[in-house]
Amino acid sequence: MVTTVDQIFVILQHWFVGYLPAILQPFAGVLLNVVAIVVTFPALFAIAVLLERKGLGRMQNRIGPNRVGPYGILQPVADGLKSLTKEDIVPFRADGVVHFMAPVVLVVVVFMGFAVLPMGRNMTLVHMDSALLFYFSMGACTELAIFMAGWASRNKYSLLGAMRAVAQMISYEVPLLMSSVAVVMITGSLSLDKIVEAQNHYTWGLPHWYIFTPWGLLGFLMFAVAATAETNRSPFDLPEGESELVAGYFTEYSGFKFAEFFLGEYVGMLSISGLGATLFLGGWSAPLEILGFMPSWFWFFAKIMLSICVFIWLRGTLPRLRQDQLMNFAWKFVLPMTLLNLFVAGLWRFLGDGWVRWVVCSAILVLAYVFVGRAEMHRKHYGPRSYRYAE
C-alpha cells in the first residue's frame, strides 16, 4: 500500500500509456509528464501568491484579500481573468517581435528547469548525467529574456531596470554555481538523481542530508542568499525598484504579458527552491526514517512550500538594499565564502570519518566568517543602512 501511494503517478502514467500503440507510448509518456508539470506548478504559483498576500497582510496588521470566494481563496482566479482581459499595449517605437518574445522566453526556460528535478522516487522527467549543468544553462537564459524586455521597450526606465537585473543576476549566479560545486565534489556526480540517492541514508533514524555538515550548512546559506537575489526577491528586488524605476524592466508591459513575467518570477522561486532541496535537503527523502512511509513526492513539495514561506517572511521583514550594498555583498562576502567552502569540502572528503574533520572544517568556516564579515563591516565596505529625515 505504501509503495502504491508513493508511485501512484507513475502507475497512472503507465496505465494510461498502456492503451496506446507501442510506437506512440514514448511520446505519450513525455507529453503526459510535460502536461503534469505545466498544470502543477502554475497551480502552486496561485497558492503561493495567495499565501504571500495573506501572509504579508498579517505581518502588516491588515486583512489581505478577502472578497473573492470564501476567505479570498479565489483571488488568484480573479487576478488571472483580469490579466487575460486587460488591453495589451505596446509602445509605438518598441521592437514588437522582441517585446513579445521576452516574456515567452522567460516562462519557457523557467519551466525547462523542472525537466531534470527529481520530484519523487522514479519521478524525473529526463534522466541526465549532467542534469545540474542543464539546469544552470536554462537558468542563465532568464537573464537574456529580461534584457530583451528592457531593450525592446525603448524606455530608459525599462533599460536601466534590465541592466540592473542582469548585473545582479550575473553577480549572484557565480556564488550560486560555486555553492553547488561543493555538492558535486562530495557526490562525484552531476546527476541530481544520484545526489538525492547519496543523501537518502539514515543513522539512528536521522538523515545524511548535506545541510547537516559544516560545508553543507554554509553552502546552503550561500545558495539561499544567491537564490533570493537570482529571483529578484526582497531584499534584493532592486531591478523592480518602483521608487526609482517605475516598475523596472517590465514597465512597458501590460495584460497577459505582464502576467507572464509575474508567473516566471514565482515559478522560478519554486524551481530554485526545488534545486536547493535536492542539493542540500535530501530532495524527496523524508526528514526522519520513521516518516519514510509517507510518499516521496509529498516531502519534495513540502520542502518547496516551506521555502516559499521563507521567501514571504523575508519580504515582509527586510528592507531593500542599496545597489552598492548589493554588489559589495556579492563580491566581497558571498563569493569569498563559497570559494573557501570548496576548499573545506575537499578537506571534509579527504580527512575521512571521525570528529577531526568536524572540528577542522567548522573552525575554518567560523574564523573566515568572523574575519571576512566583521572586518569588512568594521571598515565600512558595506556598512549598516543610514537614515536621514527632513526636519
Image: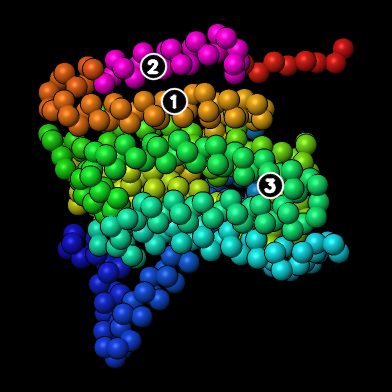
Q: In the rendered structure, find residue 162 and report the number of the disc placed on it.
A: 3
Is 295 on the left or on the right of 109, as rendered? left
Residue that appears at 36% across and 74% down: 30
Residue that appears at 72% across and 63% down: 99
- Characterize the local packing of mark 3: few (<14), some (14-19) or many (20 or more) Cα atoms within 10 angstroms: many
Q: What colouring style does the render use?
A: rainbow
Q: In the rendered structure, find residue 368 and report the number of the disc placed on it.
A: 2
- Helix, strand or loop for disc 3: helix
Circles 1 and 2, Cβ within 8 Å, touching? The answer is yes
Which residue is nearer to you in this view: 72 or 170?
170
Q: Is residue 69 magenta?
A: no
Q: In the rendered structure, find residue 68 and report the number of the disc placed on it.
A: none
Mark 1–mark 2 distance (CA, rounded to whole Å): 9 Å
Which residue is nearer to you in this view: 33 or 361?
361
Mark 3–mark 2 distance (CA, rounded to whole Å): 34 Å
- Helix, strand or loop for disc 1: helix
The amino acid at mark 1 is Pro
Question: Which numbered mark, 1 or 3, is in the foreground of this view?
Answer: 1
Question: Which stretch appears magenta?
Answer: 361-383
The amino acid at mark 3 is Ala
Is 188 on the left or on the right of 336, as rendered? left
Q: Say whether disc 1 or disc 3 marks the residue closer to the N-terminus.
A: 3
Residue under label 1, please give it. Answer: 336
